[in-house]
Amino acid sequence: MVGVIVLSSNELSPSGQFDATVQVPPFNKFIKNLRGMQLQGRKMGLKELDLYYSWPNIRTTTTMTFSWKIAGTFTNYTWTLPANYNYSSVSKLNEAFQTFCIANKLYLIDSNQNNVYYMEFLANEASYKIDLNAFLVPTSLPATYSEPAGFVGYPTVSCTPKLTIATGSELCNLIGFLPGVYDGAASAAVFSSTYIPQFNPVSTIFVTCNLCKNDVPINGSTVIATFTAANTEYGSKIEVKPSNITYYDVDSDSQQLEVAFFDQNFNQIHILDPQTTISLEVV
């Protein structure tokens, strides 16, 4: 006899009824009470899985120091990347940086009414790295340019701004830069990633089940499926539907079925969207 066990967002709640007003991420472990169902001695495998690509690449609040020289002194501004946010591309990260510059009046406006920024992040497809470009800030307003209301001021001697990345910053892995101060001083400069950026630090997702037989113990549960978020836009649905289901022996009489999600290092994935459906086939 073939049967299907379905787990949904309700299995994220101890009460069996998910309530978004009180439950908070991560949503990476689904627990179902089997209510007397006897599965020991049978086999089980993943039939279908639907979830949203919603795990961020910035897990903790990350700050950097952006320094702009006014007259002869650098003034420091704190650029904050909020926790549990996903910068899905270099251009998205650069947009966040530009928003920070606008908020702090750290830019000028050219004759076409385009904002002119004096530092930027760009993808370098040829080197498979990221370039941080630093440009010279003029000592006075260039002809045909204008200043935003509240503009902070100019240096006495033309120089670039500087960006300081602290030790332990999540931005290091994201853009491939070592901690340090990136400053072109009296010349425009281009700084390139030291190592390959990791905009998606989760390369593989493991799905585990506590009831399935585990010949090679990993984290106490058997891996019953693997998948990736490759070619999936952040916020879009990932659908996993094996053409051939792999069945695993159920060697536990536990009445609590647990399905969990881990990354390639067996760290639990910080899934932000609870809308997940897991279908397990029992034979």
Image (cartoon, rainbow, N blue to C red):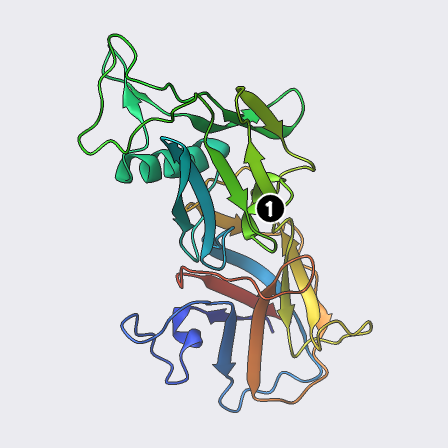
The x and y percentages for residue 230 are 58, 41
- Residue at 42% across / 45% down in the picture? 236
Q: Nearer the viewer, residue 170 or 37?
A: 170
Foreground residue among 230 and 186: 186
Q: Residue 278 vs residue 274: left or right?
A: right
Location of residue 187 in the rendering, given as x and y in whole percent from the top left corner? 54, 19
Res 200 seen here: no
Residue at 23% x, 16% y is 113
Specify few, some or many for label 1: CA neighbours under 10 Å numbering under 14, 14-19, or 20 or more: many
Can you name the residue that lies furthest to the right here? Answer: 215
Q: Quadrant of the N terminus?
A: bottom right
Under mark 1, the amino acid is Cys
- Which residue is pictured at 56% across the width and 51% down the height? 166
Quadrant hosting residue 191: top right
Tell me how many marks there are: 1
Location of the C terminus by quadrant is bottom right
- The residue to which callout 1 is attached is 172
Helix, strand or loop at label 1? It is: helix
**Relative to 94, does residue 180 appear above or below in the rendering?**
below
Q: Is residue 115 above or below residue 150?
A: above
Q: Quadrant of residue 274?
A: bottom left
Percent x, y for residue 152? Answer: 28, 34
